[in-house]
Image: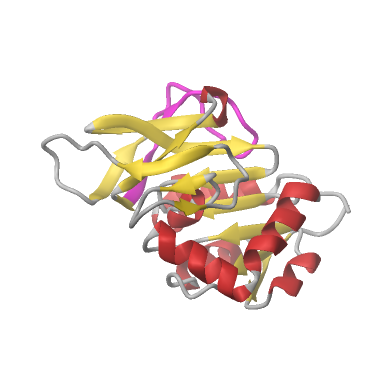
Amino acid sequence: MLTPRAHIIDYRMGNLTSVKNAIEHLGYEVVVATEPEQLKDATHIILPGVGSFHRGMERLNEFGFTAALQEEVGKKKKPLLGICLGMQLLADRGLEHGETNGLGLIPGVVRKLESKDLNLPHIGWNNIQIENTHPAVPFQAAQKPDFYFVHSFCFETKEGSDVLATTEYGEKFAAVVARGSALGVQFHPEKSQKSGLGILKAFMEMKYVN
């Protein structure tokens, strides 16, 4: 069994410092990956991100991370955590600023949140409802922990079984998704205090054997 080591992908789409600090606070080694070749040495990969789906995929393609993620996660099954935009990029495609192909690690589409009369973006604390059990979501259905959200788009999965937790803001949408070794959270665990650290710790305890 390899010692857990988180590689956080730096593709110039958001501040990585708070994610890095949270993982280090939990006692794990962290590497900020600026080159796709670095992911070969990772046991766990984190894809954070703030911004648009279209620009996010442009950056992943530009820096060579798209093929690397499909190899290391899609084929080798290394645990991957996508955060906020990073979760959305796991989808087949996104509809922000036109239609853009995603990483295709979890079947589905990213579309604008139907917030009804509520303002977008959805900003602030909101609780989640556990829908399916998973090792990386260490909560019971009755707990409904709070997390910090900032987003205007949501991930509509092709299969309902890929949704681990939901949240409501105008409509019910996926807050946590997973398939195989790929996991995504729409909220920011690094800004969500004790509950967020619980998610990050459970993710880092997901097993990967080389």
Side of 49 where 90 appears, left or right = right
The C terminus sits in image quarter? bottom right
Work out whether residue 167 or residue 30 is closer to the camera in this orientation and state it. Answer: 167
Work out whether residue 115 or residue 92 is closer to the camera in this orientation and state it. Answer: 92
Secondary structure mostly seen in magenta is loop
Q: Position of residue 191 (x, y in %)?
A: 39, 57
Q: Is residue 100 magenta?
A: no
Q: Position of residue 201 (x, y in %)?
A: 61, 50
Residue 202 in view of the camera: no
Q: Is residue 144 magenta?
A: yes
The region drawn magenta spans 129-149
Residue 18 in view of the camera: yes
Q: Residue at x 68, y 58 (%)?
A: 69
Q: Residue at x 56, y 67 (%)?
A: 60
Q: Position of residue 146 (x, y in %)?
A: 36, 40
| Applied colour scheme | secondary structure
Work out whether residue 191 or residue 44 is closer to the camera in this orientation and state it. Answer: 44
Q: Residue at x 70, y 49 (%)?
A: 79
Q: Residue at x 49, y 23 (%)?
A: 131
Q: Quadrant of residue 207?
A: top right
Side of 55 where 177 appears, left or right = right
Q: In this view, which residue lies farthest toward the front? A: 98
Work out whether residue 162 or residue 107 is closer to the camera in this orientation and state it. Answer: 107
Question: Height in image: 29 above or below 136?
Answer: below
